[in-house]
Amino acid sequence: MYDKIAEYIAAHEAEALALLRRLVEIQSGSWNKPGLDRMAVAMADVLGGILPQVRVLPYTSHGNMVQGQTLPAAAGSRGILLVGHMDTVFPADTSFTMYREDAQNCYGPGVYDMKGGLVAGVYALKALDHLGLLEKIPVTFFCNSDEEIGSPASKTWIDENAMRNTAALVLEGGGINREVVTGRKGRMGLRMTVRGQARHAAKPGPKASALLEAAHKVIALEALNNNVEITVNVGRVEGGIGPNTVPDTTTLLVDARFLSSHDQQRLEEEIRSIAARNTIPGTSCELEMISGRPAMPQSAANMKLFEVARLQAAAMGYDLPQELRFGVSDANYIADHGIPVLDGLGPVGDMDHSDQEYIVKQSVMERACLVAATLLALSATFPS
């Protein structure tokens, strides 16, 4: 069966790369609703040729999203959730808009993160459909439009549908050495607003400078870094109106990452303590959580799912490594429900979130084969 899957996918490589070009050249930054709505139409059109139940899910403040299902999944059978996002980090006015290829690689906005993964998922389903194997597998394919900004609109759908499935495959880009992702750090995005008392800078004596207090807090926050387990970064500081004025307000934007729920709880406690503790008299601090995702531990269930995929890769003639990745994805939300999830099943590449973003061309079809074979292997565990 591996040979038949590979034969179909290899025969459709040019068609798959043409779809990749079409998707990449649709500008779909997370806040570009018109572009994301065009992406949703494109994905619904493609999936409509494979799956019997395809719907565009309308959203007012975010791009529309797409849900496609086989008949068993639409009828409520617990099965496999495929997840991929259509948005990119590049804004609507970016100059980075074009797709190109050379002999080895494909380049363009979102080619790795993660329109290449969408194409791999599509052609995995196309291969199984062509071989008459898809119709009995309960599969739901969800394409969301807000992953790069924390999935604020799609999280409800993900939470509800994760619980309706027995496993999930997420199509984020694969590691440069073919790695798939069995675990991810969790993340908190925080805003600290430090307040003091404005006055003329020429006046002598103690001053309730919000900026000076914020500097103490930056040092304390950065001291929380603990090698791999916990990382904290104060990435932006805003405050003051000029050098001759004592700042009355300073804002810190903070990124904090952790490996486990225990680390998250400890980190939250330490950050709240820093916010509550003021070094400069006359200042105060407000702490706000503005975004976040739970940790995705390398659980026994995830490792069991990885072993299924690893055996498929071995049958196709190559080793499949696994990794703990420090960035977050929608896999974090799925894992938080205790559902086995394997991520990083998209094409191999690098330089995401930059104008050097690329994928290795041959890995598009390789990953499509891997996803198809893994879906087929997982389906063998479901009741007939």
Image (cartoon, helix red, strand yellow):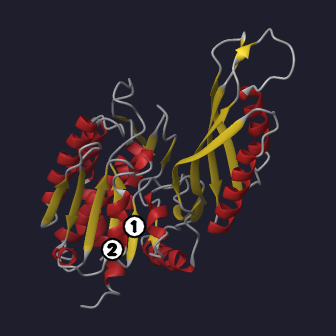
Q: Is residue 317 visible?
A: no
Helix, strand or loop at label 2? It is: strand
Which is more N-terminal, label 1 or label 2? Answer: 2
Q: Is residue 191 visible?
A: yes
Q: Is residue 372 left or right of residue 333?
A: left
**Which residue in the structure is indicated by mark 1?**
169
Q: Do labels 2 and 1 touch, CB within 8 Å?
A: yes
The residue positioned 75% from the left and 25% from the top of the image is 209
- Residue 291, horizontal then vertical, whole percent: 51, 49
Q: Residue furthest right?
A: 205
Kind of residue sitting beneath label 2: Ile
The CA distance from mark 2 to mark 1 is: 7 Å
Helix, strand or loop at label 1? It is: strand
Crowdedness of circle 2 by 10 Å Cα count: few (<14), some, many (20+)? Answer: many
Residue 73: quadrant of the picture: bottom left
Front-most of residues 315 and 352: 352
The residue positioned 38% from the left and 26% from the top of the image is 94
- Residue 283 vertical position relative to residue 14 in the rendered view, above or below: above
Q: Residue furthest bottom?
A: 383
The residue positioned 59% from the left and 62% from the top of the image is 323
- Residue 274 vertical position relative to residue 354 in the rendered view, above or below: below
Kind of residue sitting beneath label 1: Leu
Q: Is residue 359 left or right of residue 198?
A: left
Q: Which label number is shown at residue 44?
A: none
Crowdedness of circle 1 by 10 Å Cα count: few (<14), some, many (20+)? Answer: many
In the rendered image, which quarter contains the N terminus?
A: bottom left
* Image mark count: 2
- Residue 5 vertical position relative to residue 184 in the rendered view, above or below: below
- Residue 113, horizontal then vertical, whole percent: 42, 46
Front-most of residues 104 and 190: 190
Q: Which label number is shown at residue 80?
A: 2
In the rendered image, which quarter contains the C terminus?
A: bottom left
